[in-house]
Amino acid sequence: MAYESTDGGTGAGGAEPGASDSLRTFGAVVQALREHAGLSREEFGTLVGFSKHTVASVEQGRRMPDRDFVERAEPILGGTGALRRAAPHLSRQAGLASWFRQWARLEATAISLYTYECRVVPGLLQTEAYARAVSLDVPPLPDPEELEQRIAARLARQELLAVTRKPPTAFSFIVEQAVLERWTGGEEVTRGQFDRLLELIERNWNVEFQVMPLRQPSHAGMDGPMRLAETPDNCWFAYSEGQQNGRLIANAKEISLLQQRYAKLRSQALTPEDSLSLLKRSRGAL
């Protein structure tokens, strides 16, 4: 992903979405059965009511098959029940860049997640409209199917914010003020994004949000965005990301260094209370 997300992780600019093993396997079975039936993708697509491009995306493991796709494909491809039985076990990794998937698996079970972001609003906090604007900002432009997969994957990850999880994940976000004042997507999208942030901060007691002010002479985040995750067995991992690549960090010394930087960033950013006040003033000015 070019941005999170991300929450790849962040946005997902022009990244190629990664396919999970289960989606890849399901797609290979669909392709084998289709070819055994002597059908081209276009012919099969006509029979099930989907385009040949959608059929290709399913067969290549890039798209989660719709329920209608499975139900219509089943009798056409032999009626064995194999597709219907396999569909509930598919894991939805579509829309996440290949280098982000390993971090996403850690993220899903983490008990603590820390994020410093200087480019975009973190993916876990984005509205659908903001996620769409970010995805369309960074070349190359995704095709419509890829765009929808990317946005759906990012929004699905936001379930991690729920306070009903056992145990709920403790979140810390530090976001540059410049990111909030960029007006990504325009005034209406920005207004909706501010509303989303305010709602989350005031409703979710497990979310701490801090703004790094525009003027901060001492800044520990000059090397770029970072994420830290604590697993249920209290091990820490980190993730860093740049143009068209990302890196999962497990080395204890590197993680210690990033933890020191994140602690410094927390002390340099506005307090959660002052950050909330700034968000409210900025929202009121829109």
Image (spheres, rainbow, N blue to C red):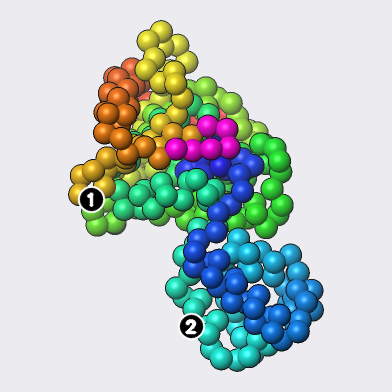
Looking at numbered disc 2 in the image, what kind of residue is underneath it?
Arg
Q: Nearer the viewer, residue 84 or 255?
A: 255
**Mark 2 = which residue?**
85
Q: Is residue 246 magenta?
A: yes
**Residues at discs 2 and 1 in contact (Cβ within 8 Å):** no
Q: Nearer the viewer, residue 101 or 116?
A: 101
Residue 45 visible in rendering: yes
Looking at numbered disc 1 in the image, what kind of residue is underneath it?
Pro
List x then y, in percent, for residue 269: 35, 20
**Mark 1 = which residue?**
232
Vertical placement of 183 versus 39: above or below? above
* Quarter the C terminus occupies: top right
List x then y, in percent, for residue 117: 45, 30
Question: Which residue is found at the position 56% from the left and 91% from the top?
Answer: 80
Q: Main secondary structure of the magenta part?
A: strand
List x then y, in percent, for residue 163: 30, 52
Question: Which residue is found at the position 61% from the left and 44% from the top?
Answer: 15
Q: Is residue 178 magenta?
A: no
Question: Which residue is found at the position 53% from the left and 67% from the top?
Answer: 23
Query: Callout 2: few (<14), some (14-19), or many (20+) C-alpha neighbours within 10 Å?
Result: few
Residue 191 visible in rendering: no
Query: Which SS class for mark 2?
Result: helix
Mark 2 → mark 1, Cα distance in angstroms: 32 Å
Question: Residues in magenta?
Answer: 242-247
Q: Is residue 210 left or right of residue 215?
A: left
Question: Which residue is found at the position 71% from the left and 41% from the top?
Answer: 140
Vertical placement of 174 versus 236: above or below? above
